[in-house]
Image (spheres, helix red, strand yellow):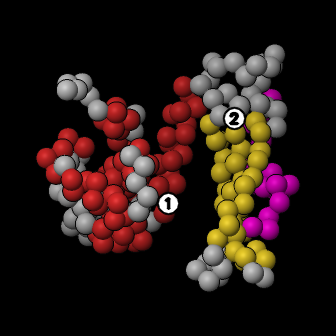
Amino acid sequence: MNFGRTLFSQVMDFVPWTSFERIVTRHRGDVRVRSLRCGEQFRIMAFAPMTYRESLRDIEACLGAQPSKLYGMGLRQPVAKSTLADANERRDWRIWSDIAAVLVRRARKLYVDDDTGLDLASTVYALDSTTIDLCLSLFPWADFRSTKAAVKMHTLLDLRGSIPSFIHVSDGKMGDALALDLITPEAGAIY
């Protein structure tokens, strides 16, 4: 029997909760919320990929299987699928974008001294993109081709630790050269 701290608890310790609360307050994420606050939503959505959950119904079933363990995860009560769906739909996306930026900055600090395998003193970045295919009938706004919808995710990786320092999601037709115009160059860095 395990008497130590859970992996989930250790990962949640990495989250700067004071910054989290400041961001939620700035974007008014918990205004008029009765049941599922932003902190709980974040914990649930962080728990899902760690346990290979694939749907909201799957998350609800997994969390409902051990209700006595929810308090230790920072959850007040079992979450319903509809409540989680409503929170995911109605909350301002900028909350999660700002929190992701804070976490990326913290993670990059951990890899500052890692060796890239190259004999260079400056930071080295690699820009790459991937096309994410979507169903045209469900995402008509994601115009790509006449029979296909897609978005493109442009990612700028810091090669020390392979941590993304910039991510931009665009329509499927945007090329990498145009994504370079969105990046603020860092002095002395190699792109």
Q: CA distance from mark 2 to mark 1?
A: 23 Å
Snapshot quadrant of residue 110: top right
Give the residues in magenta.
Answer: 172-188
The residue depicted at 21 percent of the width and 64 percent of the height is 35
Rendered view: 95 above or below 91: above
Rendered view: 170 above or below 188: below
The residue depicted at 72 percent of the width and 60 percent of the height is 131
Residue 94 numbered tag: 1
- 174 falls in the magenta region: yes
Q: Which residue is mark 2?
A: 158
Left or right: 35 in relation to 147: left
Whichever of labels 2 and 1 marks the residue nearer the N terminus, that label is 1
Left or right: 108 in relation to 26: right
Give the x, y percent position of residue 139. Answer: 61, 78
The residue depicted at 58 percent of the width and 80 percent of the height is 138
Say what secondary structure mark 2 lies in: strand
Give the residue type at disc 2: Asp
Left or right: 20 in relation to 108: left
Let me know if residue 161 appears in the view. Answer: yes
The residue depicted at 64 percent of the width and 41 percent of the height is 164
Rendered view: 13 above or below 77: above
* Image quarter of the C terminus: top right
Give the x, y percent position of residue 65. Answer: 21, 53
- 77 falls in the magenta region: no
Let me know if residue 181 appears in the view. Answer: no
Give the residue type at disc 1: Arg
